[in-house]
Image: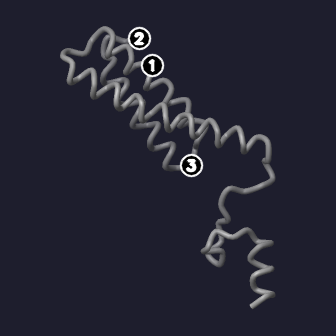
Amino acid sequence: LQPNSPNKAIDLASKAAQEDKAGNYEEALRLYQHAVQYFLHVVKYEAQGDKAKQSIRTKCTEYLDRAEKLKEYLKKKEKAPAKPVKESGPSDEKGLGITAKCKAEQIV
């Protein structure tokens, strides 16, 4: 790891959040994992003081939790690739699938 680990970790975490927000979950997962590695290095070798270490550990926990959720999502997506997570049409505002929407319209 680089001697400038805190900045590298922050940069990776920031990029991970951007990719996450953009829906690039595989890349976000990879970046979150790398960011955590750098943060843990900082905690072990570079951080000064217990407050700084605790703050970094808290962030690591948040990043790891998000990485786990992304991993689960990607695993489910692999098993059922034909099933979209979100319908992207403005007429499907309630988040219903197309089949459920059609059935609902027939009943009404």
Which residue is more in the foreground, 92 or 65?
65
Q: Residues within 10 Å of mark 3 (few under 14, many from 20)?
A: few
Sequence-earlier tag: 2 or 3:
2
User: SS of the residue at dot 2?
Assistant: loop
Q: Is residue 99 left or right of residue 36?
A: right
The relative height of residue 96 versus residue 69 in the rendered view (above or below) is below
Say which element carries label 3.
loop
Q: Earlier in the sequence, mark 1 or mark 2?
A: 2
Q: Give the quarter of the figure containing the N terminus.
A: top left
x 58%, y 39%: residue: 70
Q: CA distance from mark 1 to mark 2?
A: 9 Å
Residue type (three-letter) at the residue carrying disc 3: Gly
Q: Quadrant of residue 79?
A: top right
- Determine the residue positioned at 58% across, 41% down: 25
Residue 1, numbered label: 2
Name the quarter where the C terminus is drawn: bottom right
Question: Front-most of 98 and 51?
Answer: 51
| Nearer to us in this view, 22 or 101 | 101
Pair 1/2: label in front: 1
Q: Quadrant of residue 94?
A: bottom right
* Relative vertical location of residue 6 with respect to residue 69 in this rendering, above or below: above
Q: Is residue 43 left or right of residue 33?
A: left
CB under 8 Å between callouts 1 and 2?
Answer: yes
Label 2 and label 3: CA atoms lie apart by: 28 Å
**Residue 44 lies in quadrant:** top left
Please name the residue that numbered disc 1 is placed on: 37
Question: What is the x, y in percent for residue 19?
Answer: 50, 42
Which amino acid, by three-letter code, is at mark 1? Gln
Q: What is the C-alpha distance between the residues marked 3 and 1?
A: 23 Å
Return the residue at label 3: 23
